[in-house]
Image: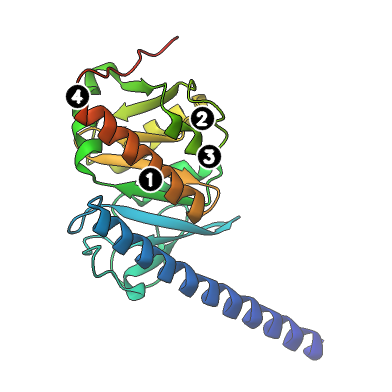
Amino acid sequence: MRVSQEISRADAAARHEIASSRFDDLAESLCEIARRFYGRGWAFGTGGNYSIVLAHSPLQLAITASGMDKSTLLPSQVMLVDELGEVLEGSGRPSYESLIHVAVVRSQRAGAVLHTHSVWGTILSRRYAADGGFTIQGFEMLKGLEGVTSHEHPEWVPIFRNSQDIPLLAAAVEQVLNERPAVHGFLLEGHGLYTWGENASQALRHVEIFEFLFEVLGRTPTITPVPEKL
């Protein structure tokens, strides 16, 4: 019995060491993403938050801490949280919007969630807020979104009214994403873009595609997003 207990403890310690090592790698990746987005003008100052899934069951999410300058983000400013947004590892306070990340991961089975605060995303989020969103169609860059094979694909971008009641906002997001699993991202009004992917690389690609399309729409007033076809 004693030998069995010692083996079990050794196995548990090994699993913890592997998980800790992977968390460290994810923290480094999130810092690299933060610097990249800052350099592109998509996350100035403390704007934006990013997460990568460490485990789905039970859910464990590496996520950037709240209020951190994304140009100088350090691995020590990345935290591990559970599906309630409670801290499992790290110090400080996780992103205030952790529950939105959790809602996206649960509804989309995402492996990474990225949230930017770009100028063009913010402008469009206000311009089309009354319509609840807008459809982008006819652009070759749409094919950069996972599963999209034609420029004629109509990509619906929902817009949610911004709120400081994050649990309520997260619930609204999860409901819409469950109803419309084909969308690749959404906007918070006056706030910014949320998009995701099976992994960080795919999520990064989706950010770049959306931000390109948002800038095209924003810079070209004669281009009107296509109304949603119900």
- Label 2 sits on what residue type? Asn
Residue 168 appears in the rendering: no
Eye-nearest disc, 2 or 4: 4
Q: Please state which amino acid type lies under the numbered disc 1.
A: Glu
Q: Which mark is residue 45?
A: none
Towards the viewer: 213 or 95: 213
Q: Identify the residue under disc 3.
A: 108
**Amino acid marked by disc 3:** Gln
Q: CA distance from mark 2 to mark 4?
A: 25 Å
Q: Earlier in the sequence, mark 2 or mark 4?
A: 4
Q: Nearer the viewer, residue 160 or 43?
A: 43
Dot 4, how many residues are within 10 Å of its Cα: few (below 14), some (14-19), or many (20+)? some
Q: Is residue 72 visible?
A: yes
| The label number, if any, that marks residue 127 in the structure image | 4
**Nearer-N-terminus badge (1/2):** 2
Instruction: Give the label on residue 178, or none.
Output: 2
Quadrant location of the N terminus?
bottom right
Among the two numbered marks 3 and 1 on one chain, the one whose residue lies closer to the N terminus: 3
Q: Amino acid at mark 4?
A: Arg
Q: Which callout, 4 or 3, points at the residue further toward the start of the chain?
A: 3
Asked if residue 3 is positioned above or below residue 68 in the image, the reply reads below
Q: Alpha carbon of mark 2 to alpha carbon of mark 3: how far? A: 8 Å
Which picture quadrant has residue 123? Answer: top left
Q: Position of residue 182 (x, y in %)?
A: 52, 29
The residue mark sitting in front, 4 or 3, is: 4
**Which circle's residue, 2 or 3, is located before the other in the chain?**
3
Residue 17: percent from left, percent from top = 58, 80
* Dot 4 and dot 3 residues touching (CB under 8 Å): no
- What residue is disc 1 on? 208
Give the residue displayed 47% in from the left and 30% down from the top: 183
Q: CA distance from mark 1 to mark 2?
A: 24 Å
